[in-house]
Image: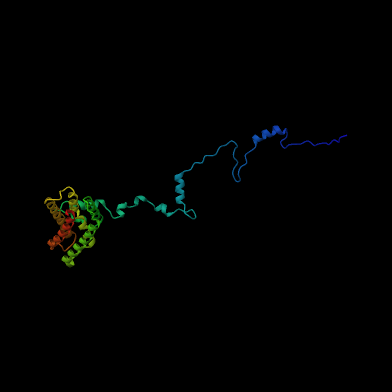
Amino acid sequence: MAKQFTVPPVVFPSGGNPTVVGASNMQQRRVPTAPFQPPRPVNSGIPFMSFDMGQAALNSLGAGPIGGGPTSSLATANFDDEEPLLDELGIHPEQIWRKTKSILNPFRVNPTVYKDSDLSGPIFLYLSLCLFQLLAGKIQFGVILGWIVVSSIFLYVVFNMLAGRNGNLDLHTCTSVVGYCLLPVVMLSAASLFIPQGGPVKYVIAGVFIIWATRACTNLMVSVADGGEEHRGLISYACFLIYTLFSLLVIF
């Protein structure tokens, strides 16, 4: 005879049929959340977070490296107060144009615009002369630069020897004047590209440009420095030699 054992009934926590109750509890079960985060609904999507990039960048720039204090660079950085790049390099196009335009009239050279000497205009004329000579088949970059330096030193020494104690011409001003008065020679170099090589026409045109450059340089040298008015003839002769030398490069 088999022995009978009494089995206690199984009681589930929610009660009822486990197959039916388990299905209903699956729908009501919450999704576990990460620690230290608020609970989130079951059917909710990913929340949208809006960022103000301009405000965020401003806050990041305004915060200091330590302590979160404001930096001084944000308060002082004002690009409107910055000088133009050409002015920082010492290149003034309006001033160069006024000086160049003054050379175009050899009879009425304005010496007031040459009180502030610069070398940006002479460098531009030097490169222009080298370019026209290059178009003529002559590579003379080093020769022209060397002659400009020697000519400036030569005219500086001659003027100060003639003026004596009254001479106040410096080498920087002398180089600027010699460079700006090189404009007629640059024009001669450009015109020589269209003038026939043979014949006296080229020599006559070269003589006109030499006289033009000599007169302009003499008037400027006498005006920008003291003590040269009584030695105008000798200064004019030195200027004539300088620009004749440059014109020979163009002719031959």
The x, y position of residue 99, in whole percent, is 21, 53
The x, y position of residue 34, in whole percent, is 60, 44
Choose top left, top right, bottom left or bottom right for residue 43: top right
Residue at point 36%, 50% (across, down): 79
Viewer-proximal residue among 157 and 72: 157
Viewer-proximal residue among 68 and 123: 123
Choose top left, top right, bottom left or bottom right for residue 226: bottom left
42 displayed left or right of 76: right
Q: Is residue 115 visible?
A: no
Q: Quadrant of the C terminus?
A: bottom left
User: Which residue in the rendered view is the most extreme toward the bottom?
Assistant: 165
Choose top left, top right, bottom left or bottom right for residue 159: bottom left
7 displayed left or right of 212: right
User: Which residue in the rendered view is the most extreme toward the right?
Assistant: 1
The x, y position of residue 181, in whole percent, is 19, 55
Q: Is residue 158 visible?
A: yes
The x, y position of residue 36, in whole percent, is 60, 46
Viewer-proximal residue among 246 and 34: 246
116 displayed left or right of 81: left
Residue at point 12%, 61% (across, down): 233
